[in-house]
Image (tube, rainbow, N blue to C red):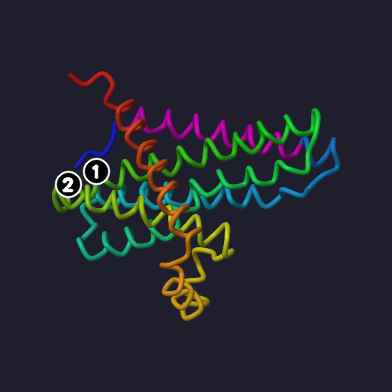
Amino acid sequence: MKIYKQKSHNKILSNLAMMSALGVFLFLFEAIVLHNTYLIGINWNLFLAWVPLFIVLYMNKQVKAKALSKNRMLIYSFLWLLFFPNAPYIITDLVHLHPYQGNSYWHHQIMIYTFAFVSLICGLLSLYWIQKIWEATFSKYWSMIFVIASVILAGYGIFLGRIQRFNSWDLFTHPMALLKYVLHSFSNPTAILMTFEFSVFIGLAYCMLHSLIHLNDQ
């Protein structure tokens, strides 16, 4: 199974790496010149946004080696899903803009947007590639079910991360606390609103990416 052309794959990853480097450079400028390291955590968030992409790249390598059984694919897919919400999550870091004014405001705006943009693309691209793996392994129908479920869970995951400050690894380190909160959040208006709006946004953004990838298809 061929998920993507190698040259296109390398070019995409190179561009994502350059955009990531730009974000880190803007942060270093802030830390060194402006003496402000308040948003140092955004660099860690960027790394987490790359994790789903790393997982899919590894899955594709296993596919080429014909070493990815259905059971292993489900395990890797679960691991991917656990980290996928971290990619669009950085959009919510725009909340940190409120204390800044003047030139500092504009610097922070472009810096956070750079991190958010490259992280979102990492997530959407990983979703596109893992959908191809699911489609080839199971069927187009199940791949679409997986995509829809992933988008909705990502919207809910953003709520858990931003509002309740849960992390991907809390599923293993604090499973009961996470489960208890999840069960009590179904009637939470903020949970419903954020899940719905972020799911729609991620879904439409993915449709846009899918359309651009297939722009020259006849």
Q: What residue type is labelled 1?
A: Lys
Name the spot of residue 64 as percent of width and height, x first: 24, 46
Q: What element carries label 1?
A: helix
Q: In the drawing, what numbered circle is on residue 27?
A: none
Question: How many residues crowd mark 1 within 10 Å: few (<14), some (14–19), many (20+)?
Answer: many
Q: Which residue is drawn at 46% across and 58% down?
A: 157
Is 22 within the magenta?
yes
Q: In the drawing, what numbered circle is on residue 136?
A: 2
Region in magenta = 6-28
Is 210 within the magenta?
no
Q: What element carries label 2?
A: helix
Q: Quadrant of the C terminus?
A: top left
- Residue 28, picture quadrant: top right
Q: How far apart are marks 1 and 2 (CA)?
A: 6 Å
Q: Which residue is drawn at 43% across and 44% down?
A: 123
Nearest the eye: 56 or 107: 107
Question: How many residues crowd mark 2 within 10 Å: few (<14), some (14–19), many (20+)?
Answer: some
Q: Quadrant of the N terminus?
A: top left
> Mark 1–mark 2 contact, CB under 8 Å?
yes
Name the spot of residue 45 as percent of width and height, x first: 58, 51
Q: Main secondary structure of the magenta part?
A: helix
Which residue position holds label 1? 132
Nearest the eye: 37 or 193: 193
Q: Residue at x 83, y 39 (%)?
A: 32
Q: Which residue is drawn at 60% across and 34% down?
A: 114
Nearest the eye: 163 or 112: 163
164 is higher (above) or lower (below) than 141: below
